[in-house]
Amino acid sequence: MQKNRFYYILEIQYLGFRYHGWQRQPNVLTVEKMVRKTLNFVLPRHQPKVLACGRTDAKVSVEQTYIELFTEIPLENLDHFFDVFNQNLPADIRLLSIRETDAQFNIIQSPKIKEYHYYFAHGEKFHPFSAAFMCHHPNMLDIELMQSLAPLFAGTRDFYSYTFRPNPETQTIATVDHAELTKNTNFTASFFPENSYVFKVKGNGFKRNQIRLMMGALFDVGSKEMSEDTFKSTLEGSNRIKLTNIAPPSGLILEKVHFVDE
């Protein structure tokens, strides 16, 4: 006899600095592990299971994303669950909202737009507390040049150079809706450096390490380790240029996920 199943969409955010990414792995601390542990505590009879709309790597943070919760007993009071679940989650994971959905919803296959932000500062080493939120680049960077080149990522193109370890079957053509590099005014703190910056990129799908490869290329151009012409050549996948500078993960934040059909 098939058991009943009940479906819920949880909107969450988390600081990823102390975690080895989202996905549960043996012998390391992950966000999924802590979410599952908390669910099993607050819903001991429901046999809860979760599925994320995407995975994050170690030290990558999330401002807003979604996971789907499956239970075998319905949640009688969503407001009560919201409060109890938040109270028992670690301080660096937070539930933003919860709503019921149904079996027709597929959190993996549903079309979605994702926006990522990458925060960084350069030059003099910053306060250690900043390390959880942004990357430090030791070299002085040509920020104006980086700002002029960042928008070139936008468009539908072959992102072969920005695909981590592509094989002949890897689909490398994708669309980036928007890309820009600006001064950081989103996050402030007394221990942040006087000037910090954010690379913002939005699109309908990104491969593993793609944003960090983009940032790495901008770092290379800004520090004069890559020419402007070479950078532009990487935007033509037919050139088959393999990039190796993957920017550190601690500056990367999944800013927002939007389901296209909503």
Image: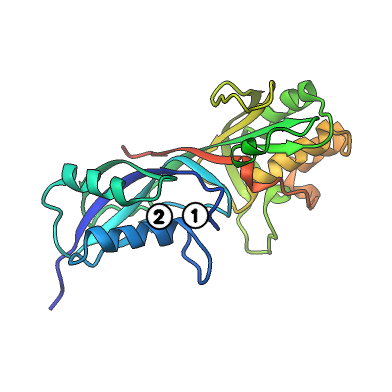
Q: Which residue is drawn at 24% across and 55% down?
A: 104
- Where residue 247 appears, as percent x and y from the top left, is 71, 45
Q: Which residue is drawn at 18% across and 63% down?
A: 5
- Where residue 191 appears, as percent x and y from the top left, is 63, 28
- Where residue 149 appears, as percent x and y from the top left, is 74, 28
Locate residue 122: give its quadrant. Answer: top right
Q: Is residue 176 left or right of residue 146?
A: left
Circles 2 and 1 in contact, beta carbons < 8 Å: yes
Q: Mark 1 points at which residue?
A: 55
Quarter holding the C terminus is: top left
Of residue 102 and residue 173, the one placed in the foreground of this image is 102
Quarter holding the N terminus is: bottom left
- Where residue 67 appears, as percent x and y from the top left, is 36, 51
Of residue 156 and residue 249, the one placed in the foreground of this image is 249
Of residue 104 and residue 87, the one placed in the foreground of this image is 87
Mark 1 is surrounded, within 10 Å at the Cα level, by few (under 14), some (14 to 19) or many (20 or more) other residues, namely: some
